[in-house]
Amino acid sequence: MNIKNQLQNQVIKAIKQLFDKDIEQVDFQETRKDFEGDITLVVFSLLRYVKGNPVEIGTKIGEYLVENEEIITNFNVVKGFLNLVFTDEFHLTNFYTAFAEENFGTTKKSSKNAVMVEYSSPNTNKPLHLGHIRNNLLGYSVAEIIKAAGNKVYKTQIINDRGIHICKSMLAWERFGNGETPESTGLKGDKLVGNYYVRFETEFQKEYSEWINSKIGQLEFEKFKETPIWEKLFPDVDTNYVISTTPMTKVENNEDFFSNRAILKEFKSYFKDNYFNTYSIIGRDVKIILQKWEAGDKETVKLWKKMNQWVYDGFEVTYKNLGVDFDKLYYESETYLLGKEFIAEGLKSKVFFKKEDSSVWCDLTDEGLDKKIVLRSDGTAVYMTQDIGTAIQRIKDYPDVNSMVYTVGNEQDYHFKVLFLILKKLGFDWAKNLFHLSYGMVDLPEGKMKSREGTVVDADDLMFQMTDTAREISEELGKLEGYSDTEKEELYNTIGLGALKYYILKVDPKKRILFNPKESIDFQGNTGPFIQYTYARIQSILRKADFDFSKEVSINELHDKEKNVIKQLQLFPDTIQLAAKNYSPAIIANYTYDLVKEYNSFYQTVTILSCDDLETKIFRTQLSQKVANTIKLSFGLLGISVPERM
């Protein structure tokens, strides 16, 4: 029986016997670390049934439990909280139950319904960057945690391999590439293609800058000032304001609120939405490529396949180095067609409606949202089209999937609200079990990354940098005597990647991260290397143990530090379930840090291998081994390796 259920039954009996009151449930919580106790009964919640002083009520219940419940040895009452102390025998029994389980904390598959977790889902016009790293680490870890909680899991991604952004790289390569390839340049394919995406934006910016300073550009700016966009975003800016391309020119009489750059950004977006094809030569040409691709033009499709393959090959290297994998890959170029089919069905059932320009929309105003386009007037698909098709195709491929988790940044919160609503309107029962794992962006000390400007932190470069930083710090510490060069490099990589992954995963997914590579590789504090070092320290203890510590022993009395470690170990199964329920690797990461802190306090307070009493020495070695196994298991859920030596 669950210990809380066991104690609840005893407390209910106590209240009946002591106060002649019938209750059905009581509230327990963890005992605060500054008080003695192993579990706390919240007496305040009983006052609705039992009138009186909460300290007196708690004292009477405590005395009853000490007398009638064999696992309770003592108690104390602090205001309205009854702190109960378990016997050493209880702690030892719990420990040896955990000690006997190789994968203590995890649950064997208990659900027939599977969960599909989507992550990564990159565009094939650029290499993976720091933002993708957070996405991949979150998605992979959430999938592993859900699996450990007893569910069947499929890991997947949707590769955004079609659309205007892909065509930009294609056009720039055709126009400026001179036939170069990954082989001829020595570049990974995703980096080569990404360079041409940046080149397109550079060429477009030249055209845009010339246009914005032209007479027609100024006339269009005057039109822009008459749009709802202007009134909404710049309500305090006089419509007599004249645009300037000089960066950071302050708006007159409004210096603290808006800059010229903010207006330029919105106008550029307005220009792309309304005049991209009209006034930009390169913009018009890239739209032609998109139309040719959707029409199945052989040469366009051939180029598209070639450049996409370059990117896929590059991605595969990055995924392998990062330590993530997938069970199934989906491609937008395939699933958007299925989305179109269901939009046609939805038109018949009036889930969608068609405007005069032939564009197709879904009216979500009754749900507090707005009207959402699902097909453009020229019949081409939008992202929503693809996502509708992808969701449906996944259920067709995996009928046992009952829920899906989408790991996508919080800038897409609205998109997923719309997607889930549309799928519900289309009549799919499983749509109620869709979840958007929305996460905050990753910033660097120098500011926000921008892919089109080529100012992102490349994922491969970052992983190399982390390994390099780990090398520098490890060599400074000088603790690698006896390591071969190969062993050293493996260790540097383990430490560097562990630091990167832990630094990102220890933060609640919803929060934005300011990533500092140097700060993440610290052998003190709440960092990956600190936890890895503790694991390696325990392995050293186990290697030195020249006695059999595989069997259960009897201990007369537990040290407080031993009990604290055991109690922390006992939290692991519930921690996994909580992390799975909240889709939060941060819960696992911070649990592991707390476990390591408790163990290090134990390690610094008591002797282990030099203990005179053999039984105690064996027990403390066993306790160390179980802590190490739990660190390894929990870090495995985060996708982090642990070194045997450091």
Image (tube, rainbow, N blue to C red):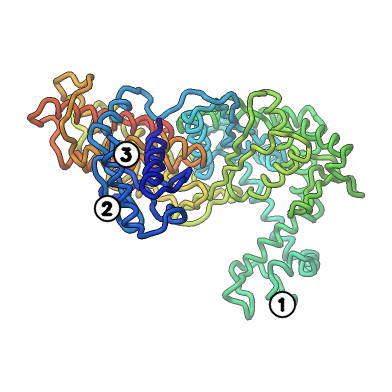
Q: Is residue 430 visible?
A: yes
Asked whether, in this view, residue 511 is left or right of residue 38, the answer is right
Location of residue 307 in the rendering, given as x and y in whole percent from the top left corner: 65, 31
Front-lying residue, 399 or 56: 56
For the image, the number of numbered tags is 3
**Cα distance in 3D space between marks 1 and 3:** 62 Å
Tag 1: amino acid: Asp
Which residue is under mark 2? 34
User: Residue 385: percent from the left, percent from the top?
Assistant: 76, 39
Residue annotated with mark 1: 238
Q: Is residue 593 left or right of residue 504?
A: left
Q: Residues within 10 Å of mark 1 (few under 14, many from 20)?
A: few
Please, what secondary structure does the residue beneath circle 3 have? helix
Estimate the x, y position of residue 417 in percent, counting from the top left: 68, 47
Question: What's the CA distance linking mark 2 and mark 3?
Answer: 15 Å
Q: Amino acid at mark 3?
A: Gln
Q: Earlier in the sequence, mark 1 or mark 2?
A: 2
The crowding category of the residue bearing disc 3, from other C-alpha atoms within 10 Å (few below 14, some 14 to 19, many at least 20), is some
296 with respect to 611 (left or right):
right
Nearer mark to the viewer, of 2 and 3: 2
The residue under label 2 is which amino acid type?
A: Asp
Residue 609 lies, with reference to residue 605, above or below; the image says: above
Q: Quadrant of residue 261?
A: bottom right
Q: Which residue is mark 3?
A: 568
Foreground residue, 10 or 122? Answer: 10
Label 2 sits on a secondary structure element that is loop
The percent coordinates of residue 248 (x first, y second) are: 59, 69
Depth check, front residue: 409 or 46: 46
